[in-house]
Image (spheres, rainbow, N blue to C red):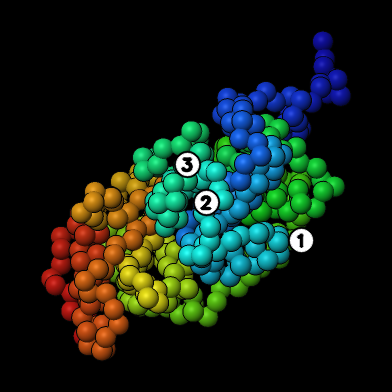
Amino acid sequence: MQTNIKDIKRKDDKVDSAAERTITPKSEELSTLLHKHSGERHIVAIQNFPDPDAISSALAHQMISHEFGIETDIVYDGFISHQENLAMVRLLEIDLLRYHPKMDLSIYKHSIFIDNQGNTTTLTAKLREAGIKPLIIVDHHERQNILEAQFTDIRKVGATATIYTDYLRDGLLQLDKSRPAHTKLATALMHGLRSETAGLIRAREKDFLAAAYLSSYVDQPLLAEILNVKRSHRTIDIIKVALENRIIKQNFSVAGVGFLRYEDRDSIPQAADFLLSEENVHTAVVYGIVQKEGEREVIVGSLRTTKVTLNPDSFLKSALGKDWQGNYYGGGKYEAGGFEIPIGFLSGTYDEDFMKMKWKIYDSQVRRRLFEEIGVETERPIDDD
Ligand SMILES: [Mn+2]
């Protein structure tokens, strides 16, 4: 007997609809928790240099919370400096608050940590001091065990935006194509998901499913506009320095870029992404000394890798170790990582010779630690000039 192709009922031409999908335990748990906290005001803490994944996930959290009668403020304690991120916030009209010492944290009943676990935002200590207890942590980085919250959802997926899209698919907020706020949210999440997975190249099944779901709500022209933003001059300059200074050994490309302005800190991961595009390079690390007016100096670094067997989190933890308080200088997630090392006693801007010496010492130390971890014999002391 022949089956007429028209008789086969197509069940799979839609990713899902709320009716077909049964709510997952995590979504249910979150829904119950939010319900219990109705009427409260929460602070959503995102990393100091928020990226599209953090921004879009925080927006999703804000809109979901609103459904449960919870008001939220999305707060960061640093800079949005990446041109693309500035464009995203502006074009999608996302309300982000930059932390200010005069901010009254006591108006918040709880804190929420999204796309971080308290280690990449300096709000953690400020919130702790203000006695604000963490309620929710949603993240896709390796587990850091710094904070304890009532609800924790840490998954090994390409982006936090994937987790939030799952909550949407589970009906925590029913997207409606005719509502501009909803198409903006879908556009934001798609951008977060794409940028976090290098344009879906590093995406896995769960991320693709999320992208497929979002696709019917995305405002394509708006997304194109966000993606069309060019790199800033300063970023191009920093990439140039990274190219000049890079040392390639065993497919690792390592570059120190010297001193940078705090506002240009986002150029470091962009330079690492750039170094990764060179043939035969599977891992790139770029670092520099970031100076913030009136505050401590830190070495900031970014790692990018396409090597499946390299775990950025354990690589950086093992290479750079811990501070005297036992906190690791670095950490990461699938295919990306970062580190921050305070300079302490040597902090401050003095004459050119002093600055040169300071950079030389830190540059050679970071490089030595990285190459030792890679397993390359430490070369002769580095003399640049
Ligand atoms: Mn992320």
Q: Which mark, by number, is residue 221? A: 1
Q: Please provide percent x and percent y for residue 305.
A: 40, 54
Which of the two discs, 3 and 2, labels the residue nearer the N terminus?
2
Question: What is the count of numbered marks?
Answer: 3
Say if residue 64 shows up in the picture.
no
The alpha-carbon separation of the residues under discs 3 and 1 comes to 38 Å
Q: Please provide percent x and percent y for residue 95.
A: 65, 59
Image position of 152 (left or right of 305): right
Reading the image, the residue beneath label 2 is 106
Picture quarter with the N terminus: top right
Image position of 123 (left or right of 344): right
Q: Please provide percent x and percent y for residue 81.
A: 53, 70
Q: Which mark, by number, is residue 134? A: 3
Q: Looking at the image, is mark 2 or mark 1 nearer the viewer? A: 2
Q: Which mark, by number, is residue 101? A: none
Which residue does the image show at 44% across and 51% down from the upper left?
Answer: 130
Which residue does the image show at 80% across and 53% down from the upper left?
Answer: 180
Answer yes or no: disc 3 within 8 Å of ligand 1: no
Query: In the rendered structure, which amino acid carries the disc numbered 1?
Result: Pro
Are the residues flagged by discs 3 and 1 in contact, CB closer than 8 Å? no
Which residue does the image show at 24% across and 48% down from the upper left?
Answer: 326
* Element carrying mark 3: strand
